[in-house]
Image: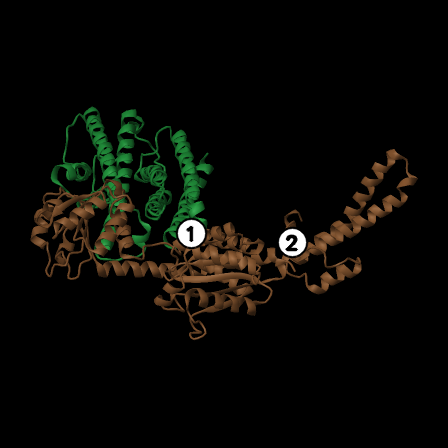
Chain colours: A green, B brown
């Protein structure tokens, strides 16, 4: 099984790279071949990715979220599933170039640095822990999608404002569609992260007997949670424009990346298990 | 002589060769077209005829034995019907012969030859003119096939290229931009400020694209009311325009006001009532109706005539880039048409060859049939028929191949006739029963 998992570890980023190239051809050149093959390539990569995660879960006896690099792969898979749903819903493939690029980046980092912990903390096999991490990862994936659509919204917003009618203008769907995805994905991300935080706090009380503490990981995540909360209610409560929601979503995702990478690498936190 | 021996030609004038006042004069109504085509059918100068008359072109397509005579016939016809002396202005009209005329019709139908590159109406006009020609009986085997090829090329260009993509008029550019801001125009309200022609046209376009509701504000209120009745909208006095601005999603402004009618400060106040909902303003007035600084405000998309022109020019550039793809489609359809036409030349030879051999077979069966008992005569018929078919088959295939590839020259046809002692001068099968071949 090790050979199979290791092979998939190489095949997956390769397939995502090919799919990304296909979506690039579609975005930049309206290539007919890419139009026919891009989605299928992504479906194929997604199926293999699902199989890889399943095999890894069987081998480990737990959902593969023990390390940040395993979690990256789950984030990539979650973004992929949500994106395919969006593509199927709006029937537009031109935003795929931006999303598949992010999926490829997450999977590449995951495949390149994936190492198996020699000892698994028994806490990681606890079902409530698995649920806590899974909801957090799903929340991160939704937030990534929100941020990407927020970025696309802003690109098109300024192009239309400043009368630049180039590739971005031609290829992207309407501002309203992208504002809706930014807002919708942010709401979904906020909901999942809320659940993850509640479960996390419950776990903390159960395992450490402790209440909330101003740990760097928790503090940063709390900040992201606040930002996405604002994205969720900003338009209704404070009359935020879609542009402001898009900026906030990008800021929220920057905070999450900071939490994922910088905090995990530079700070010591009780929130590390391997 | 069959239609396969006749040559195509087109005599016509279009936006590139003749000024508008001449094109206006030589435009033919449907009634005139019917009359001309009916007359041409009886006079027999042209084997088949088809007349395309639009605001940008009048073109006579015909099939004739002598293109010189046919050209004179058409030029005289224009001179008599429309009192336009083409001899005095030789540059107004053009004549194209055979393959060039076929290629020309295909290019016309695809929009490659249109004043506004890739415009879609021309395909409908070609179809309509084809229908008229069929009704009168002026369109025969060859022109019918050519027109089918033209329509097919037009459809392919529309679906497989972007030759007709992107807005290239102010009204359609405004609608395109509105579609880039709002996903669904059917839930959007439009405000038209000023009931000028350009503004009205743009508003009509928005309604055609599905905009839900139109409010019209004008200095002369009665004019706003008239237009509101016509477009099923609401009329509003100009001094109440700000309350509409707080409500609507799309604004088209084209008043004759010498200074802006909405300042940046007023717009800020209006935006505070909109709860962050974006507003799209198309300011096509000169001088402008909305202070240009308004375009910097969050939630406002402000486009003036320059922006529209920029978008139209970009779209035209994109259309021009699609010309090679469209030309390839035209050449493919043209080649298919020419191959089909060339295959018609084989039809008489094949028919005569079959008839000749069948005659021989029947004679031989009649001669020796009496030596067979009645039960065996049926077998004899079947045997000789089968034998004949098998002998003829490779020759038929080869003749069709030569014909399809354009290699069936008159020398080869003559050889076939001489080898089998075929009689010429019989009815040309291509006149009616070539489909069975």
Q: In the image, is A233 to the left or to the right of B179?
A: left
Report the residue at 50% width, 57% height from top: B37
Between residue A143 and residue B345, name the one nearer to us: B345
Between residue A190 and residue B50, name the one nearer to us: B50
Locate residue B248, reporting x and y percent. 17, 44
Q: In the image, is A23 to the left or to the right of B106?
A: left
Locate residue B6, reporting x and y percent. 60, 62
> Distance of mark 1 from mark 2, alpha carbons?
30 Å
Other residues around mark 1 within 10 Å, as few (<14) / some (14–19) / many (≥20)? few
Q: In the image, is B430 to the left or to the right of B48?
A: right
Q: Residue under circle 1?
A: B124
Q: Quadrant for the N terminus of chain B, please.
A: bottom right
Between residue B134 and residue A168, name the one nearer to us: B134
Between residue B176 and residue A185, name the one nearer to us: B176
The label shown at residue B423 is none
Task: Answer yes or no: is residue B298 visible.
Answer: no
**Farthest bottom residue in view:** B88
Q: Chain of mark 1?
A: B
Other residues around mark 2 within 10 Å, as few (<14) / some (14–19) / many (≥20)? many
User: Along the polypeptide, which appears first: circle 1 or circle 2?
Assistant: 1
The label shown at residue B430 is 2
Q: Is residue B279 above or below residue B100?
A: above
**Farthest right residue in view:** B371
Locate residue A49, reporting x and y percent. 40, 37
Badge 2 marks a residue whose secondary structure is helix
């Amino acid at each position: 099984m090790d050979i199979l998992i290791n092979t998939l570890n190489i095949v997956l980023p390769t397939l995502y790279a090919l799919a990304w190239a296909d979506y690039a051809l579609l975005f930049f050149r309206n290539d007919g071949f890419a139009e026919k093959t891009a989605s299928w390539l992504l479906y194929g990569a997604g199926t293999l990715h699902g199989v890889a995660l399943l095999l890894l879960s069987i081998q480990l006896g737990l959902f593969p979220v023990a390390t940040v690099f395993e979690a990256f792969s789950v984030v990539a898979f979650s973004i992929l599933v949500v994106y395919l749903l969006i593509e199927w819903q709006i029937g537009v493939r031109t935003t795929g170039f931006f999303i598949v690029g992010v999926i490829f980046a997450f999977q590449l980092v995951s495949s390149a640095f994936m190492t198996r912990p020699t000892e698994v903390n028994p806490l990681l096999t606890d079902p409530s822990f698995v649920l806590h991490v899974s909801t957090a990862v799903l929340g991160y994936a939704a937030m990534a999608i929100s941020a990407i659509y927020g970025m696309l919204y802003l690109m098109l917003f300024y192009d239309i404002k400043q009368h630049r009618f180039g590739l971005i203008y031609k290829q992207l769907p309407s501002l309203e569609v992208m504002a809706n995805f930014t807002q919708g994905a942010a709401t979904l991300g906020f909901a999942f992260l809320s659940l993850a935080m509640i479960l996390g706090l419950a776990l903390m009380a159960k395992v450490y007997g402790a209440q909330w503490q101003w740990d760097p990981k928790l503090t940063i995540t709390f900040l992201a949670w606040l930002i996405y909360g604002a994205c969720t209610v900003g338009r209704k409560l404070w009359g935020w424009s879609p542009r402001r929601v898009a900026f906030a979503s990008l800021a929220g995702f920057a905070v999450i990346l900071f939490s994922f990478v910088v905090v995990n690498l530079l700070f010591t936190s009780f929130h590390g298990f391997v | 002589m069959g239609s396969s021996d006749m040559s195509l030609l087109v005599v016509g004038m279009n936006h590139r060769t003749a000024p508008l006042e001449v094109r206006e004069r030589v435009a033919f109504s449907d009634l005139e077209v019917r009359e001309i085509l009916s007359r041409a059918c009886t006079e027999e100068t042209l084997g088949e005829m088809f007349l395309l008359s639009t605001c940008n072109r009048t073109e006579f397509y015909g099939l004739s034995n002598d293109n010189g005579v046919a050209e004179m016939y058409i030029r005289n016809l224009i001179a008599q019907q429309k009192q336009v002396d083409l001899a005095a202005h030789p540059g107004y009209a053009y004549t194209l012969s055979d393959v060039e005329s076929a290629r020309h019709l295909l290019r016309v139908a695809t929009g490659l030859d249109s004043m506004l590159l890739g415009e879609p109406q021309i395909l409908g006009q070609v179809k309509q003119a084809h229908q008229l020609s069929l009704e009168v009986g002026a369109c025969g085997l060859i022109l019918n096939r050519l027109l089918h090829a033209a329509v097919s090329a037009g459809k392919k260009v529309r679906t497989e290229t972007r030759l007709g993509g992107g807005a290239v008029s102010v009204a359609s550019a405004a609608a395109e931009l509105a579609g880039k801001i709002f996903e669904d125009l059917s839930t959007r309200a439009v405000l038209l400020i000023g009931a000028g022609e350009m503004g009205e046209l743009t508003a009509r376009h928005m309604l055609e694209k599905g905009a839900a509701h139109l409010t019209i504000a004008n200095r002369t209120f009665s004019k706003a009311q008239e237009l509101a009745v016509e477009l099923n909208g609401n009329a509003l006095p100009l001094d109440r325009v700000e309350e509409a601005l707080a409500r609507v999603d799309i604004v088209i402004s084209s008043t004759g006001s010498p200074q802006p009618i909405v300042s940046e400060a007023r717009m800020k106040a209006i935006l505070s009532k909109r709860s962050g909902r974006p507003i799209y303003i198309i300011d096509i007035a000169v001088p402008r109706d909305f202070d240009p600084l308004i375009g910097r405000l969050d939630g406002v998309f402000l486009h003036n005539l320059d922006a529209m022109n920029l978008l139209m020019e970009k779209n035209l550039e994109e259309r021009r880039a699609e010309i090679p793809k469209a030309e390839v489609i035209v050449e493919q359809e043209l080649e298919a048409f020419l191959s089909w036409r060339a295959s018609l030349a084989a039809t008489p030879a094949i028919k005569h060859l079959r008839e000749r051999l069948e005659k021989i077979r029947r004679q031989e069966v009649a001669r020796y049939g009496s030596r067979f008992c009645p039960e065996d005569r049926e077998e004899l018929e079947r045997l000789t028929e089968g034998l004949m078919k098998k002998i003829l088959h490779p020759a038929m295939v080869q003749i069709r191949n030569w014909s399809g590839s354009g290699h069936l020259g008159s020398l080869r046809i003559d050889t076939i006739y001489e080898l089998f002692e075929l009689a010429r001068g019989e009815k040309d099968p291509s006149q009616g029963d070539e489909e069975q071949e």
